[in-house]
Amino acid sequence: MTNPADAPTSPGPAPVEVRGLVKRYGELTAVAGVDLTVEAGDVYGYLGPNGAGKTTCLRMMLGLIRPTEGTVRLFGRDPLESVHALDGVAGFVEAPTFYPYLNGRRNLELLASFDGDDARGRIDEALETVELADRAKDRVGGYSHGMRQRLGIAAALLRDPQLLLLDEPATGLDPAGMRDMRLLIRRLADQGMTVLLSSHLLAEVEELCNRVAIVRTGKIVYEGAIAELKRSAGATYRLSTTDDERAMAVCRAQPGVGDVRVVHGRISFTADDGTVAELSQALIEAGALIQMLAPQTVTLEDLFFSLTEGDGVVDEKAPAVATR
Ligand SMILES: Nc1ncnc2c1ncn2[C@@H]1O[C@H](COP(=O)(O)OP(=O)(O)OP(=O)(O)O)[C@@H](O)[C@H]1O
Ligand SMILES: [Mg+2]
């Protein structure tokens, strides 16, 4: 597959282009002006805490609800305009739903009957891909949560999609289930599928996605490559001194040092190259002697909190954060 970044000419309309997307429910603005572009070949993470508007945004992308303002284009087509706009697009919002008293295969057969003979012919392959072939004859009511999520992906694969839109595919799965889901999505991406998935699991997104949008109360606070976001954040350090209160003040006053806060009882800050030596000198002069100063690997989790709690406002329904 051609890497779109290398292509000299435009490869055609992007799989997803969202511009100025707003959804209001009465007084409440669930999605507050979202712009994002998912390019062919991306595994794109739409990341935000509970209530950030992820599901609402995905519903608008899939043409299930009408935006209050703004536009969605999937491969250049408006999902509200005709059913054909969703050709080559599949996915689910919230959890996929099935008839619990029917087996996995029968559920897929029913879904395939809406999509024609081609879809019917893909059932075996879809079951193999999601590793449910040997459980296909069991009733879905007896499936684990992870198996149901995988069956949801199998249902999406019946449409032979080029673009998969998945709402929190790994939420509620145990660590092994999450790993299986990650591997499955990675396999699909390697086959050339473009994927947009929403998540509040930062570690998952970091491992799986090449690009992210980080949303907070309906607004995007960052969109772009994870690598770029990490680079722009600079190196993060942890610090403990004989007088942390004074050390915090010194850090805050030091040029080149930013995002000073307390994490797990230690001072955390970001610093440009070369500023740490000057900072340590300033700490000594202020009488805050260093007991521990260590560089940290920046995780998306650090970045997420610095972006979403930057002005000190903490979402009370704060994210169930995946830690490693
Ligand atoms: N049909 C609706 N009517 C009224 N308010 C709604 C409706 N759908 C969503 N909301 C509100 O919009 C906001 C965003 O909800 P949404 O479900 O999109 O968030 P989310 O990011 O998917 O959250 P979660 O991580 O919990 O799934 C919430 O405050 C929610 O209560
Ligand atoms: Mg949701």
Image (tube, grey):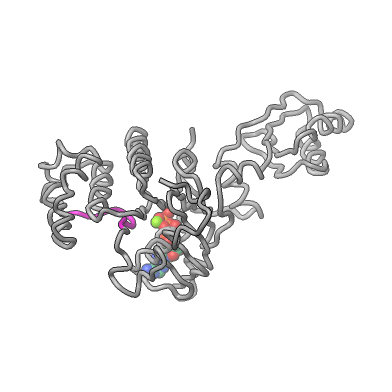
Q: Give the range drawn in magenta.
A: 90-98
Residue 103 image point, x, y percent: 11, 47
Taking the image as four quarters, which one is ligand 1 found in?
bottom left
Q: Is the magenta stretch mostly helix, strand or loop?
A: loop
Q: Is residue 145 left or right of residue 179?
A: left
Which residue is more in the foreground, 166 or 211? 211
User: Residue at image x 55%, y 42%?
Assistant: 300
Residue 83 image point, x, y percent: 28, 70
Q: Which quadrant would residue 250 be assigned to in this image?
A: top right
Return the residue found at the far right: 285
Residue 264 image point, x, y percent: 61, 34
As drawn, 88 above or below 26: above
As drawn, 163 above or below 134: below
Count of marks, rendered view = 0
User: Residue at image x 76%, y 41%?
Assistant: 257
Query: Which quadrant of the figure contains the N terminus?
Result: top left
Which residue is more in the foreground, 140 or 105? 105
Is residue 145 highlighted in magenta?
A: no
Is residue 92 highlighted in magenta?
A: yes
Which residue is more in the foreground, 26 or 6? 6
As drawn, 60 above or below 131: below
Q: Which quadrant would residue 111 be assigned to in this image?
A: bottom left
User: Residue at image x 31%, y 55%?
Assistant: 91
Q: Is residue 136 left or right of residue 61?
A: left
Residue 285 image point, x, y percent: 89, 30
User: Residue at image x 79%, y 43%?
Assistant: 252
Q: Is residue 211 left or right of residue 100?
A: right
Return the residue found at the far top: 291
As drawn, 298 above or below 94: above
